[in-house]
Image: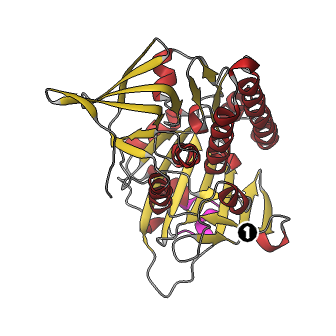
Amino acid sequence: MRWRCVVVNQQRDNCLIHCDIAVIGAGPAGTVAAAILARCHVNVVIVDPLELSTHKVGESVPSAMAALLSATDFDGLDECHHMPISGSETLWCDERLSQDAFTQPGGMGWRLDRCRFEQQLLTKAMAAGANAHQGRLQAATRQSEQWQLTLDDGQRLQAAFVIDASGRNGALVRLLGVERQTTSPLMAAWSLSEAVKDGHAAVGKTLIESDETGWWYGAQLPSRKWLAIYHTHMPQAKRLRQTDGLWRSQLSDTALISQFIDPSLFDPSALTLSDARGGYLKQAYGDGWAACGDAALSFDPISSQGIFNAMATAHQLATTYLNAQPQEDGLQWQRYQHQLNRIYRAYHQRRQGFYLRAMQHYDSEFWKHQCA
């Protein structure tokens, strides 16, 4: 992939990149925001390490994604690279529930080839006129209504406005010390299987199963590999990683998921731990900056809405920036914040519905902490 940037004022080995907006993060949120702004002739530079080959947990999107892609002028999804979700099989609190996507009001969602999807979004943003620079944000200062950004490679950027779309870690908001509210700690202990050999029919269903110390998620990816994730608290996650074969043994003990997934396909030593708790910024915008996607509000994976909401909030942020008028004294940004708050309240209500039921059923410390 070819990277483009506007370079001026070269001094020694460093150069200063000038832009109207610096977008920190090249995930779904960052690329959607950058593309929308670039189409309106805003000079945008995307900053990201660009580790596109790294697998990222989170690959499901709802049927509403088709309308969102259309609204943001991105190409639709196709079965050549992504896989339709045909429904779900859930065993929650020992109660079995099967759902068929064809009976749902919105129809089928999609299981993404996440790396290919993000690469397509980035290519589309650059085709719209956005520039990109490979690097990580290290420092940010604001003077005379301009940001001075320093990257880990020594590169410096000057921007009038900065969008933090860098994910849960919030590269910019962390430097600014913006307060983030989070739910109880939740870890995702996950692994990818070997690819299932040809001759076996692909499984398009999402698999969910709860137990006393957490809950499992299983799905077959477009690569025909299985992704299995156990969501639990940190002590149990550490035990799973430190005890050889324990994670695979627990997968074998599942009543539902082991009917679909062969635990022997997983390397017992290849287990990754990721932070999976939800959270939100009490204030997702400020003087010359705003956040979207997981940097603004991140969801517990039970929602299966992370990618969709990252792109939706990016769309809202870009539209807010383009419509904001100085004489309004921040009215448009207040509306943006209210919309984020509304989204988070709806998500939290749905999450609590699942988790309170599990707390009442299992009466375990894990579920009590999740509902606290």
Outermost bottom residue: 199
Q: Residue drawn at (48%, 61%), measured in percent from left and top?
A: 120
Magenta part of the protein: which range?
252-261
On the rendered image, what quadrant is the C terminus found in?
top right
- Residue 240 appears in the picture as rendered: no
Q: Is residue 352 within the magenta segment?
A: no
Of 273 and 329, nearer the camera is 329
Indicate the amino acid at tag 1. Met
Of 110 and 203, nearer the camera is 110
On the rendered image, what quadrant is the N terminus found in?
bottom left
Quadrant of the image occupied by residue 192 = bottom left
Q: Is residue 275 left or right of residue 9?
A: right
Image position, residue 83 (x, y; %) = 59, 71
Residue 258 to residue 327: above or below: below
Residue 108 to residue 212: above or below: below
- Residue 74 appears in the picture as rendered: yes
Mark 1 sits on what residue?
Answer: 108
Q: Is residue 254 within the magenta segment?
A: yes
Element under disc 1: loop
Q: Is residue 213 left or right of residue 371?
A: left
Residue 329 to residue 315: above or below: above
Image position, residue 11 (x, y; %) = 18, 25
Quadrant of the image occupied by residue 332 = top right
Magenta stretch, main secondary structure, is loop
Of 163 and 143, nearer the camera is 143
Outermost left residue: 12
